[in-house]
Amino acid sequence: MDTKSQRGIDRVNPACTIPDLAAQITAALVGNAAALGIGDIRSNNCPSNIALVIGTSGTTGMSKEVAFTSHALLSSARASNKYLKAHAGQMWSLFLPLTHIAAVNVILRSMELGTLPIDLREHEGEYPKVDFTSIVPTQLFRALNGDDRLLRHLQHAQAVLVGGAALSATLRDQAQTQKINVVETYGMTETSGGCIYNGEALEGVEYSINERGLVQIRGSVMSQTYLNAPELYRLSDGWFITNDLGEVIDGKLKILGRADDVIISGGENISLTGIEATLSIRYPEIEFAAFAVNDIQWGHALHLAVVGEISESEILHYLEAALGSASKPKGIHHLESIPLLGIGKTDRIALAKMVGHE
């Protein structure tokens, strides 16, 4: 390895204060210090043009060290602020953990406006008013189902970015009814987080649908590589190919679900996200997570995790009527919360393990 073209990586303490982290980010961006490592980072060095490395685990559970240049990170922050028509002096709030690109983005967007975000991760009492914030669908669900102080905070904001996982149409409609200006974001760590807002690409970003129906993205916000597995970071003619199925309707991108979210049970194809979306329409006050476990009879058996009060027979009857008998879960599990992967996506592997299956 050519160590002369390398720079070290300093790992960020998740408990770091926002002012301290902002100073570290600034030094890393201008190249006056080591690159920053956030999350599960094992590498000690990176190419000299890399400013930030984020450890992220996908649905396979494999940790990938996603590397970013200063140009990609700043392009993302500036494009986001431009879309939102944000101006100098406006404020963001931070609810997201400092182990994720979304939290870094909130800090960078604030810095571009000449401010720092208000840290509300462990805040007690009423939330102060801000102009913008960024949350995941689970937090929006809680605001609309009993967390009144969060609801008021979101209602006062000029725009509320919601990303990290799929946002159901029902939840979005509920938010609009409550006068929350939701901006649905789509992206992943590799694209510096959300890069498509309400179905529209941010400045400097392009998307298309490939021959397999998968969304692919390219542009100024793209990361550079996986430090720990560069062979897995593959582009096709400059396009980063996602694992999400999509279509373009009236010039806007619509995500249909993940290509690997369809299971085969007893010879029938079942969409896990389709099960969740169908239930959320009928029972918007209940949280659902569909998952599969290996089964000697069915191949994959559909199971359902539920947070909230509802009878199992009601779920079974509704799914059978709406989607057919194949959609009836083989097991229903009442939980206090849905395990999440990262900051918003359902951890289906963890759910399978909870019921005794790998």
Image (cartoon, rainbow, N blue to C red):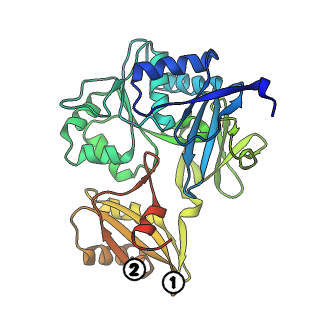
Q: Amino acid at mark 1?
A: Trp
Residue 346 visible, this angle: yes
- Residue, x 47% and y 20% (percent of image)? 22
Crowding at dot 2, Cα within 10 Å, few <14 / some 14-19 / many 20+, comes out as some
Q: Quadrant of residue 189?
A: top right
- Residue, x 39% and y 56% (percent of image)? 339
**x, y percent for residue 216:** 66, 46
As drawn, 24 above or below 303: above
User: Disc 1 designates what residue?
Assistant: 298
Q: Amino acid at mark 2?
A: Lys
As drawn, 358 above or below 36: below
- Residue, x 33% and y 49% (percent of image)? 171
Q: What is the distance, in whole Å, between disc 1 and disc 2 at their CAs?
A: 10 Å
For the residue pair 178 and 117, the one nearer the viewer reads as 117
The kind of secondary structure element at disc 2 is loop
The kind of secondary structure element at disc 1 is loop
Q: Quadrant of residue 3?
A: top right
Residue 252 visible, this angle: no
- Residue, x 20% and y 35% (percent of image)? 149
Question: Is residue 185 toward the left or the right of residue 230 in the image?
Answer: left
Residue 330 - label: 2
Q: Residue furthest bottom?
A: 297
